Image (cartoon, rainbow, N blue to C red):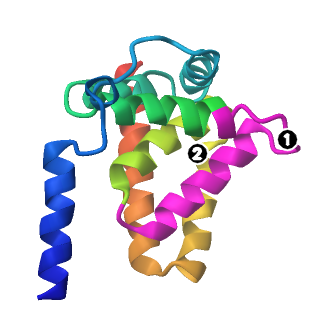
Amino acid sequence: MKYLSIVIFTLFIAVSGYGQTKNQAKMDSTKSERFERGWKKLKEIDGEAGEKVIESLKDVSPDLAKYTIEYPFGDVYSRETTLDNQTKEIAVVAALAAMGNAEPQLKVHINAALNVGVTEEELSEIMILMSVYAGFPSALNGTLALKEVIEERKADK
């Protein structure tokens, strides 16, 4: 019964927009420096695949689209660190492959890895490595996602 009350309360908050002003419920249309930096980085790394993800979110959750641009790309990917974009994408591909339940995101980041110079052979080796640490199903699914991305990229040429 306790859990049912929590679920009902949570649904009430989500549906009613309690605690949000009308302006907060919709994506802020102003483009901050953080947003602009994130959009530039998203296009640099993910290219068209990243733009499609953002476009797919605009009508259902414009705030999530904005947050996706600002936080991962405007803040994290744009950090000046010792990791270059290739290394960052290798880490992301490995993490998403290991999760085993993020195929759409994995495909976007396989594309991104290829965009920033990671080779098909390196991505294949990542999937083999995942067989050790994430299990064969994750490695097989990751390899099949890699195959689909490679085939799509060849078809687009």
Residue, x 20% and y 50% (percent of image)? 14
Q: Is residue 91 above or below residue 98?
A: above
Q: Position of residue 28 (x, y in %)?
A: 39, 19
Q: Which residues are magenta?
A: 75-101
Q: Is residue 132 left or right of residue 47?
A: right
Task: Kindly identify which residue carries mark 1.
Answer: 81
Residue 120, numbered circle:
2
Q: Which quadrant of the view contains residue 154?
A: top left
Helix, strand or loop for disc 2? helix
> Would you call the spot at circle 2 few (<14 residues within 10 Å), some (14-19), or many (20 or more)?
some
Q: Position of residue 31 (x, y in %)?
A: 51, 12
In this view, the residue in front, 142 or 25, is 25
Q: Which quadrant of the view contains residue 48?
A: top left
* Front disc: 2 or 1: 1
Q: How many marks?
A: 2
Q: Position of residue 99 (x, y in %)?
A: 45, 68
In this view, the residue in front, 56 or 10, is 10
Residue, x 28% and y 31% (percent of image)? 25
| Screen quadrant of the N terminus | bottom left
Q: Is residue 93 magenta?
A: yes
